[in-house]
Amino acid sequence: MALNADNVRVGLNGSIYMAPKGSTAPVDLDTAWDPAWLDLGFMSEDGVSLEYSTDVQDINAWQSLSPVRRVLTSVNMTMGFTAIELRARTITAYFPGSTISDVSGTVHKLSIPSAPGPQEFAFGLEWIDGTIKNRLIIPRGEVTDRGAITIGRSDAVGLEMTVSAYATSAPELATWLSDDPAWAAA
């Protein structure tokens, strides 16, 4: 197979969306995101990280020094990002179970619970490289890890979050749609 620099992709621009679990996600690249899907706004220049890992259990035999079989025991998928646009949706995603209320016309209060419960949502990621569009949809996910919030003079305040994808009734953890011609089946 020959090398082809035209198949090298970058995420020039994009958005992360969050919606209530069970919200209808686009099934193609042309359909607009339903209003239930809220754009989380600006992200840090680091963009988005996707991780996919599998764990296996080795089955060993008395007659062999190497495993005779490996059994898949788990699959994990995460999406990490740092939101730098402090919106009600990003702040309440960072602090699970939190609520925002108006104290007065211009003062708002974030109530952060001492013992939040699970808080699952649907997540969407859309990114573009020239004319090539990609969408990744996680129908069931949860913010399971958070980085420190740093408040300083030279950087934006960022809410670093990692979303873990959970299995649904469908066989997929996530769906990735792309109109990339390099993906065409051979």
Image: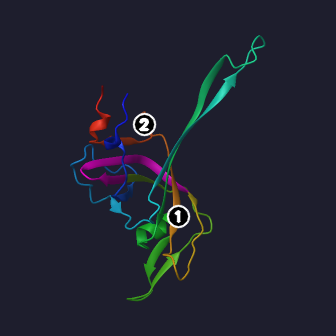
Residue tagged 1: 160
Residue 136 part of the magenta-drawn span:
yes
The residue lying furthest to the right in this view is: 62
**Residue for point 39% across, 56% down:** 20
Question: Could you say where residue 13 lies in the image, as x and y percent from the top left?
Answer: 33, 59
Q: Is residue 25 visible?
A: no
Can you say whether 132 is above or below 68 in the image? below
Callout 2: 10 Å neighbours few (<14), some, many (20+)? few
Which mark is drawn over residue 44? none
Magenta stretch: give its range. Answer: 125-144
Does the residue at mark 1 contact the one at mark 2 (Cβ under 8 Å)? no
Can you say whether 132 is above or below 97 in the image? above
Q: Secondary structure at mark 2?
A: loop
Q: Is residue 30 left or right of residue 87?
A: left
Chief SS of the magenta region? strand
The residue lying furthest to the top in this view is: 63
Residue 66 part of the magenta-drawn span:
no
**Residue for point 26% across, 53% down:** 130
Q: Secondary structure at mark 1?
A: strand
Q: Amino acid at mark 2?
A: Glu
- Report which quarter residue 39 is drawn in: bottom left
- Report which quarter residue 47 is drawn in: bottom left
Q: Amino acid at mark 1?
A: Glu
Can you say whether 89 is above or below 137 in the image? below
Callout 1: 10 Å neighbours few (<14), some, many (20+)? many
Question: Could you say where residue 143 lies in the image, as x and y percent from the top left?
Answer: 52, 57
Which mark is drawn over residue 172? 2
In this picture the colour scheme is rainbow
The quadrant the N terminus occupies is top left
**Residue for point 41% across, 89% down:** 104
The quadrant the C terminus occupies is top left
Question: Could you say where residue 55 lies in the image, as x and y percent from the top left?
Answer: 61, 34
